[in-house]
Structure formats: C-alpha cells, structure tokens
Image (cartoon, rainbow, N blue to C red):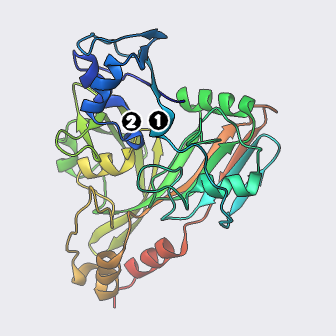
C-alpha cells in the first residue's frame, strides 16, 4: 500500500472531495472523480479517522492520508546508474545538485530516469523508507526543469527531522532566476497589484494563496480567498539592458508551494524567461538589450530558475549546514547574452 499524506490549506472548499482536489499533491495524479471513489471506499482519513462522506466539511489545517492500492503505484523502483553531482553526503543524508530536465521521483508517464532511480543506485538500500514506495528518501522536490540543490534522507530519523524543518519553514532556500522586466519599488504598477508590497532594501514581497487552476490541473493559480498561504520575496541582483528590460533576481521562500516562484513572479508581471506554463514569450527590445540577448531569451528552453543555496540544521548532529551551487551553463550563457549590446 502507498499512503499519500498532506495538509488542508486555508479556506478550503465546503465539500471534502473538492477540498481534496484543491490540495492533493499534483504528482499524485488523482482526479476529483477518483478522489470521490477513494472516499467512498474508506481510503481517506482526516486527522486519523476514516471519512466516507464526500460532502464532509473539512477544516483548514486538517491532516489527510489517502491509501492507494498497490496497483496504483509500482511495486518497486529500479536503481539506475545515472550520474549524480553530490555536494555533500554522510550516513544520514545526501545533498545533490539536480540538473534541469530530471524529474525528482517516478510518476505516471515518468517511470524511470528520475533522481530517485539515481539515488537508489548511488545509495543502495540506504534511503529512508518514510517517503513510501514511489519516493524513498525524498523530503522536498524542485520542478523537472529547475536546476539546483536538493536534500534527500538516508535514515528515517533524518527524514522526519528534515520534514519538520520544511514544515516550520526553517530551511533557507534561495533561488536565482532571470525574469522579464525589473521589479522595482519605484514602479507604481507593482504597488497596485494585490498581494504585493516592498520591504526595506527594495525587496519585493508577494503574499497570496495558491491553489489549483480552475481549468488546468497541472497549473497553480493565485487566489485571495482559498488555497495554501504562500509568501515569496525577491530582489534584483543584476538588471539587463538600457533601459533595463530583464533582470537576474534572487528569490527566497517563506513557504514552499508547488510552482510558487514561477506563479508569483508571473502574478506581478515579471514572469521567468523560458517558463512554458506561466511565462509565455515576450518580445524584448533589441535596442535595449542587443540582438544576442533577444535571441538568447527567445530560445531559452526552460524556466530560468536555479535553486542556488540550501541551508538547514542537520537533523541528527544538530550542525547548521549551508550549501551553494553556481548557476548551470545555460543560465550563465543567458546572463552573458543579456549583458551583450551587439
């Protein structure tokens, strides 16, 4: 059996089936109709108690457990000899620098070639089983086409300790991104966008709820009355162009929701270059940024987002650990092209 666990966010829908559809992890690939059947079959627990009524009113903050029959998940995952960029490793955990294009764990349509397959080959049986059959050792994840740092647990003690830190938002995660435009406190447009404010140091703060898009279950959408509370901060590191038409920004998370940076940056009009889901393709001024910069932005094949720093307290030793990973070659090339005026 595989058990999917998650928590109901703020302002849930009045019916259990709708609330589950809004908050169940995207990679669980459970439609609302499937959730209704699971509720009726007694496969759903709310705060440890089985609930079989799809109309049950669930409260914000409730803990959910959904039990799936073995047929809904692979019985085993094959270890695959996929190279890993290991940043740190000890008996309890491993930190890797994930390349863009690699899925974190197996899911429908991606049974192999994932980080989990690679970790199973690298670590053997030394991965925490807390994550279940489909995601042993996985405490958090980053999107397939986002590069950068990720920690996985090798012991159950490490898994539980890291999960607690992610839940209480004490993990420091900072990302580098290349966005359209330059988010600046002097821009009156930004001050008029709901959920947006600025903190000292020209730090953009975006605070909204995030939930599933009403018509596209693979997307997240900003809301102000229901969903998971989400807070993103961003500051400009390097503006590009004269006048500036794009920027390298540092983003950090107070919360960690699916697609959070990508959705929030798009919400404030500064979508990430290359983002196929939230960014679209914008035409940059060749006069401002040069032909090379315009071409590089137009041809960038993924969201320009990199998990650059990761800091947490070692869940067993108690030591504070901080890691950094430089931008991958494709983002470095993009930044270099943005600085060109030729």
Quadrant in the rendering for residue 195: top left
- Mark 1 residue element: loop
Residue 14: x percent and y percent? 21, 15
The earlier-in-sequence mark between 1 and 2 is: 2
Q: What residue lies at 50% left-to-right and 64% top-to-bottom?
A: 100
Quadrant in the rendering for residue 140: top right
- Mark 2 residue element: strand
Residue 156 appears in the figure: yes
Residue 168: x percent and y percent? 55, 26
* Viewer-side residue, 292 vs 199: 292
Q: What residue lies at 47% left-to-right and 71% top-to-bottom?
A: 331
Q: Which residue is mark 1?
A: 254
Residue 203 appears in the figure: no
* Viewer-side residue, 206 vs 238: 206
In the rendered image of this protein, does residue 310 appear above or below residue 54?
below
Horizontal side, residue 193 vs residue 180: left or right: left
Residue 311: x percent and y percent? 64, 43
Q: Which residue is mark 2?
A: 231
Q: Residues within 10 Å of mark 2 (few under 14, many from 20)?
A: many
Q: Are marks 1 and 2 in contact (CB under 8 Å)?
A: yes
């Amino acid at each position: 059996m595989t058990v999917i666990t998650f928590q109901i966010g703020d302002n849930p829908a009045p019916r259990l089936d709708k609330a589950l559809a809004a908050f169940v992890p995207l990679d669980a690939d459970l439609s609302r109709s499937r959730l209704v059947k699971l509720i009726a079959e007694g496969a759903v627990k709310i705060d440890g108690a089985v609930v079989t009524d799809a109309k049950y009113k669930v409260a914000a903050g409730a803990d959910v457990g959904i039990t799936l029959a073995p047929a809904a998940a692979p019985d085993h995952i094959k270890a695959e000899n996929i190279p890993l960029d290991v940043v740190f490793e000890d008996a309890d955990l491993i930190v890797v620098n994930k390349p863009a294009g690699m899925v974190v764990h197996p899911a429908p349509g991606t049974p192999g070639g994932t980080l989990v397959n690679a970790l199973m080959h690298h670590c053997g049986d030394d991965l925490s089983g807390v994550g279940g059959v489909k995601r042993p050792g996985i405490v958090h994840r980053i999107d397939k086409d986002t590069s950068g740092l990720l920690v996985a647990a090798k012991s159950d003690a490490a898994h539980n300790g890291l999960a607690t830190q992610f839940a209480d938002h004490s993990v420091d995660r900072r990302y580098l991104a290349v966005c359209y435009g330059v988010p600046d406190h002097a821009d009156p447009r930004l001050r008029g966008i709901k959920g947006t404010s600025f903190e000292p140091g020209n730090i953009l703060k975006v605070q909204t709820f995030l939930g599933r898009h009403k018509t596209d279950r693979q997307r997240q959408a900003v809301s102000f009355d229901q969903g998971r509370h989400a807070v993103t901060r961003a500051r400009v590191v390097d503006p590009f162009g004269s006048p500036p038409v794009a920027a390298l920004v540092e983003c950090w998370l107070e919360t960690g929701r699916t697609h959070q940076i990508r959705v929030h940056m798009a919400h404030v009009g500064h979508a990430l270059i290359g983002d196929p889901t939230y960014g679209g393709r914008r035409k940059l001024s060749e006069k401002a940024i040069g032909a090379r910069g315009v071409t590089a932005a137009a041809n960038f094949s993924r969201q320009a987002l990199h998990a650059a720093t990761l800091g947490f307290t070692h869940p067993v030793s108690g030591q504070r650990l901080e890691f950094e990973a430089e931008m991958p070659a494709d983002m470095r090339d993009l930044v270099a092209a943005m600085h060109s005026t030729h």
